[in-house]
Image: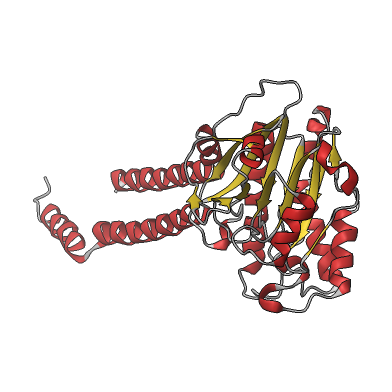
Amino acid sequence: MASLRIVNRLVCRGFVVLTLLLVFFNECIVYYLAQSSWQPIDCKLENCTRLLLIADPQILGNSYDRSSHSPLARYDSDRYLQKTFERAVSFTQPHIIVFLGDLLDEGNIATSQEYKQYVKRFKRIYQNKKLRNFRMISAYFQRVHVPGDNDIGGENGDYISNSNQRRFENEFMSEDLFDYDNRIRFFKINRMLLDFTNPDRDHNAERLRIGVSHAPLLIGGGPLLRAIISDLDPHIIFTGHWHESRIFIYPSTEVINFYENSVRHFDLKALKEQEHSYLEIMVPTCSYRMGKSKIGMGYAVLENYNLSYTVLWQPNRFILLFSYVFWGLFVVCGAVVYKMMTRCPFRVAKRQTLFNRVSTIPQF
C-alpha cells in the first residue's frame, strides 16, 4: 500500500509539473518564438522613419456576448493584444504608430458610459506605463487614428451619426499627427463617408504622401478613388478591414497575398513617376477574435522614397486555448483510468485472496 501511495503522489506531481510547463509555454515562451521569426529592417539613412501599423484590434464589448464566460474572453483578448503590442514595440521601436480603424468592436452602438469604458481599456492596452521607456525614441508616441465601421458605423450602409464621429475624434484623433519631420504627410481617408482630409494642398508636392484608410480603396474604384488620385496623389496607402494581408498595385487588378516571413521592398518614386501606379498595402488583423489563422501587425520603414515592409506574425491564440482544453480532458481521462486500474474489482479480489492465504498459515 505504501508503494501505491508513492506512485499516486508521483503521478499527481507529474500532472502538476506538466500543467505548469504548458501554461509557461503558452503564456510566455510562445511570444518569443513568434518574435524569432520576425524580419528586422535596418535603417541605412539618418532620416529613416519606422511605422508600426495596427489594424482591427476590435476591443470586445459587452453587448454582443453576454454569456457567463464573456468577462474571461474580454480579459484574455485584452491581455493578448497588450502582450503582442509590447513585443512589437520593443522589436520595431517605431517613430509613428498608425491605427487603421475598428479600434472598438461595439463603438458604434455603445452608450456614453460603455464607450468611456472601452476607450479606457484601449488606452490601457496601447498606452500603458511599461511603454513610457520608449519616449526617448525620436518622435515616439506620435500616432495616427482612422475610424472604422465598428467605431462610428457605416457597414452595409448603416447610418453614421454625428455623435459617433464626434466622440471618436475627441477620444482618439485630437492629438494625431499630420506632418512628420517636414518630410511625410498623412491623409486620413474615410470610405464610409466618401471623405478625406487635405487642409494644406499647396504644399503636398513637397512631401511623401501617405493615405491611411480603414476600408480598401484601390480595389473598389469609383468617384472617391478618382478624387484621391487627383487631389492627394498618394505614394502609398495603408488599409485594413478585410483582416487579410494583401498588396494592391493600381491600375493592375492583380491581388498579391502576402503571408511570408519576408521583407518586401518598393521604390515609391519609380512606381509613381515611371510606372504611373499606386500602391496599397492591406494590414492583417491583430486580434485572434476575428477567426483568422494568420494574425499580425504591419511594420514599414521609409528611407526617402524607398519603402520596406513586413508583417510581424503573432501566435494563434485559439490553438493555445484549445491546447488547455485538450490537456484538461487528457488529465481527467488519465485520472479516471488510473483510478480504475488501481481500484478495480480484480485487484481487490487478488488482495483479498492473498490475505486469506496469509491468514491460513499455521502460527507457531
Image quadrant occupied by the C terminus:
top left
Q: Nearer the viewer, residue 31 or 17?
A: 31
For residue 218, above or below residue 274: below
x, y (%) of residue 48? 72, 27
Q: Nearer the viewer, residue 160 or 134?
A: 160
Res 102 seen here: no
Res 179 seen here: yes
x, y (%) of residue 284? 58, 52
Q: Which residue: 72% across, 70% down? A: 106
x, y (%) of residue 361? 9, 51
In the picture, measured across the screen, residue 208 lies left or right of residue 86, that is right
Q: Which residue: 46% across, 54% down? A: 319
Q: Which residue: 81% across, 35% down? A: 132
Q: Which residue: 87% across, 60% down? A: 169
Q: Nearer the viewer, residue 242 or 357?
A: 242
In the picture, measured across the screen, residue 357 lies left or right of residue 313, that is left
x, y (%) of residue 69? 61, 69
In the picture, measured across the screen, residue 27 lies left or right of residue 9, that is right
Q: Nearer the viewer, residue 340 or 104?
A: 104
Quadrant of residue 146 in the image?
A: bottom right
Task: Indicate how the structure is coloured in the image.
Answer: secondary structure
